[in-house]
Amino acid sequence: MSRPRFSKECRTYGEWLKAQSRDTKYAKEIIRKHKFFPDRSLSQLRKLKIGDFDLSQVAWKTLSAQDKRDRTLSLQISRKM
């Protein structure tokens, strides 16, 4: 199964990245989101809210029990490294 087109103009993320200067706020956001989700297309990355997936920026009291456990476990792992 082949990977879907990244955008209408560019077949792959690499082509999109090389197409023009990527120092704008918009481009930097797409690049950051692509690091988390390399299999998504440009339109999917535009609609994606990274805050929904980056729990490090979410207040502790708003996390679910599972999210709290995951954050605590990740901190324990970081400390042991």
Image: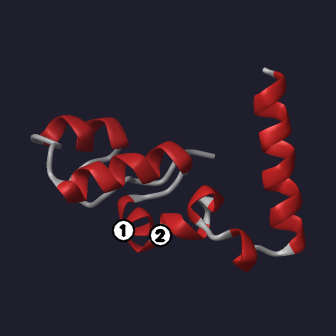
Mark drawn on residue 48: 2
Which element type, helix, strand or loop, lies under badge 1? helix
Residue lying at 76% horizontally and 31% vertically, measured from the top left: 78
Question: Are circles 2 and 1 on residues that touch, CB within 8 Å?
Answer: yes
Residue lying at 32% horizontally and 47% vertically, measured from the top left: 11
> Label 1 belongs to which residue?
46
Using the numbered discs, state the Cα–Cα distance from disc 2 to disc 1 in whole angstroms.
6 Å
Q: How is the image coloured?
A: secondary structure
Relative depth, front residue between 30 and 65 = 65
| Residue density around tag 1, few if under 14, some if 14–19, many if 20 or more, within 10 Å | few
- Disc 2 marks a residue whose amino acid type is Leu
- Disc 1 marks a residue whose amino acid type is Arg
Mark drawn on residue 61: none
Above or below residue 31? Residue 70 is below
Number of numbered tags placed on the structure image:
2
Residue lying at 53% horizontally and 67% vertically, measured from the top left: 51
User: In x, y percent, where is residue 63?
Assistant: 75, 73
User: In x, y percent, where is residue 17?
Assistant: 25, 39
User: In x, y percent, where is residue 18?
Assistant: 19, 34
User: In x, y percent, where is residue 31?
Assistant: 35, 46
Which element type, helix, strand or loop, lies under badge 2? loop
